[in-house]
């Protein structure tokens, strides 16, 4: 009740002030009728406070999001259901759901009244142009009496998560050789099968069990080799995302990093739908697998959260991929590289692994002078050439490039891009 009295509106306080003035006047003038008016003016705000105070603790609210995971630029429908749990009808209700700035302005809805045990639902839509995880709520309700004498605010503590994932673009079907063959398909197997206990070999990595050392292969190659369990009927792919802050340019949803994140999401969904066992690796610490049906949702949630990191480097990225690599297909979304960093990526080219790099020329997201543009093109071409010489397939990405148009190049190799890279290297060398 004390809190309800603090919720008196200006009109309610004016009634109380008028009641006090009328009571004093009635005592001075000896007018009993004026005293009755004073009592009436004083009782009305008290009754309003009692009425609103009772309603305050008899309301229940629930919220649902349809859907709770949406791509960038799509809308989600939020449904609020409010129920009056008391036997008394409520007054006018003003509903305000608190939203993060990225989801737009706070929606406000007015409900005239709710009868005893009556429920009512209201809906609104939210839309985000920036990926991420957001909290919808809490809901704030302002309760008033029919005369507007008292107003109280109640906040429901519950919030609901909304995940805004990167934009996923459908990709054309192409055949990517080099991965393990999936059931029912005719892709080339990357390792031989001679029996149930046969195992392919790979180079020893720190942490490998020494009991898996294959001594015949070790003697033949001169390097410590370990057995790799044969899994010929599984298509495997690793999507690698470069999150180094200095490797990307641009700001907001149109930045080169956002292009790479959207491309990683599109490729991950495309490969999962093709039956691949998928792994997502970034140099910022993400290492997630999607092996079950619908498992791409987990990867998309990770991509909704991924951010640029100031501490990332290519050596860390290579080490993360190699720690749990089982061959197959590696598709990397890479930002600006130096030739030295391109050489580090050769560590992912192991036996039976096909590596495809979507090399983003982030300098094309900037307006550069002709000399600076020529220097940037030379550096980009040199990095691409270094990757191709180590066996990578390289697909060049510039500002305005569309992934569906670039995707077939991942299967054809990088002959055309190699010719352009060599030409740029030759021209740059001639200019010098």
Image: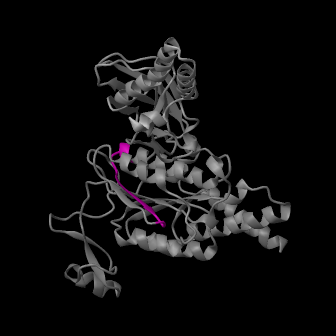
> Which corner quadrant of the image does residue 154 belong to?
top left
266 vs 101, left or right, is left
Q: In the rendering, at what x and y percent does residue 18 appear? A: 57, 23
Can residue 279 be seen at all in this image of the molecule?
A: yes
Quadrant in the picture for the C terminus:
bottom right
Relative side of 132 to 382, left or right: left
Asked if the stretch drawn in magenta spans residue 177, the answer is no
Q: Can you give x and y, in whole percent of width and height, for residue 193 in the image? A: 22, 63
Depth order, front residue of 66/207: 66
Q: In the image, is residue 274 part of the stretch drawn in magenta?
A: yes
Is residue 145 at all visible to an observer of this figure? Answer: no
- Give how far across and how far down residue 200 sits, in percent: 27, 70
- Write the residue at 28% across / 54% down: 234
Q: Is residue 277 above or below residue 123?
A: below
- Which residue sits at x=15%, y=63%? 196
Towards the viewer: 310 or 35: 35
In the image, 330 versus 393, the foreground residue is 330
Whole-percent x and y of residue 46?
43, 26
Residue range highlighted in magenta: 272-284
The N terminus is located in which quarter? top left
Quick one: which residue is furthest to the top in this view?
Answer: 33
202 versus 215 height, above or below: above
């Amino acid at each position: 009740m004390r809190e309800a009295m603090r919720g008196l509106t200006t009109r309610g306080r004016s009634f109380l002030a008028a009641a006090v003035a009328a009571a004093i006047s009635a005592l001075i003038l000896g007018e009993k009728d004026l005293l009755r008016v004073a009592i009436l003016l004083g009782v009305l705000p008290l009754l309003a406070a009692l009425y609103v105070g009772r309603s305050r603790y008899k309301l229940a609210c629930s919220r649902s999001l349809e859907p709770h995971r949406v791509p960038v630029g799509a809308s989600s429908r939020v449904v609020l259901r409010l129920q009056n749990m008391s036997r008394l009808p409520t007054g006018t209700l003003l509903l305000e759901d608190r939203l993060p700035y990225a989801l737009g302005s706070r929606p406000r809805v007015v409900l005239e009244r709710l009868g005893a045990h009556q429920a009512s639902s209201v809906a609104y839509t939210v839309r985000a142009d920036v990926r991420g995880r957001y909290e919808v709520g809490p809901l704030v309700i302002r309760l008033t009496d029919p005369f507007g004498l008292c107003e109280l605010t109640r906040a429901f503590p519950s919030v609901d998560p909304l995940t805004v994932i990167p934009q996923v673009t459908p990709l054309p079907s192409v055949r990517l050789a080099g991965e393990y063959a999936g059931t029912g398909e005719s892709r080339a197997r990357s390792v031989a099968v001679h029996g149930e206990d046969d195992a392919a070999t790979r180079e020893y990595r720190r942490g490998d069990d020494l009991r898996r050392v294959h001594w015949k292969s070790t003697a033949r190659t001169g390097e410590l080799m370990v057995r790799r369990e044969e899994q010929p009927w599984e298509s495997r792919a690793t999507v690698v995302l470069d999150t180094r802050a200095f490797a990307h340019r641009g700001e907001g949803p149109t930045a080169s990093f956002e292009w790479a994140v959207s491309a990683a999401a599109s490729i991950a969904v495309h490969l999962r739908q093709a039956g691949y066992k998928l792994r997502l690796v970034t140099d910022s610490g993400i290492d997630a697998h999607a092996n079950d049906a619908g498992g791409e949702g987990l990867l998309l949630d990770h991509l909704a959260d991924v951010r640029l990191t100031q501490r990332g480097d290519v050596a860390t990225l290579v080490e993360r991929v190699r720690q749990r690599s089982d061959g197959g297909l590696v598709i990397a979304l890479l930002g600006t590289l130096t030739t030295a960093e391109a050489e580090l990526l050769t560590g992912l080219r192991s036996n039976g692994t096909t590596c495809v790099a979507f090399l983003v020329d982030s300098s094309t997201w900037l307006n550069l002078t002709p000399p600076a543009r020529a220097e940037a093109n030379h550096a980009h071409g040199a990095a691409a050439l270094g990757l191709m010489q180590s066996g990578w397939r390289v697909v060049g990405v510039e500002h305005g490039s569309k992934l569906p148009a670039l995707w077939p190049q991942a299967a054809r190799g990088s002959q055309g891009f190699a010719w352009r890279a060599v030409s740029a290297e030759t021209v740059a060398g001639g200019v010098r």
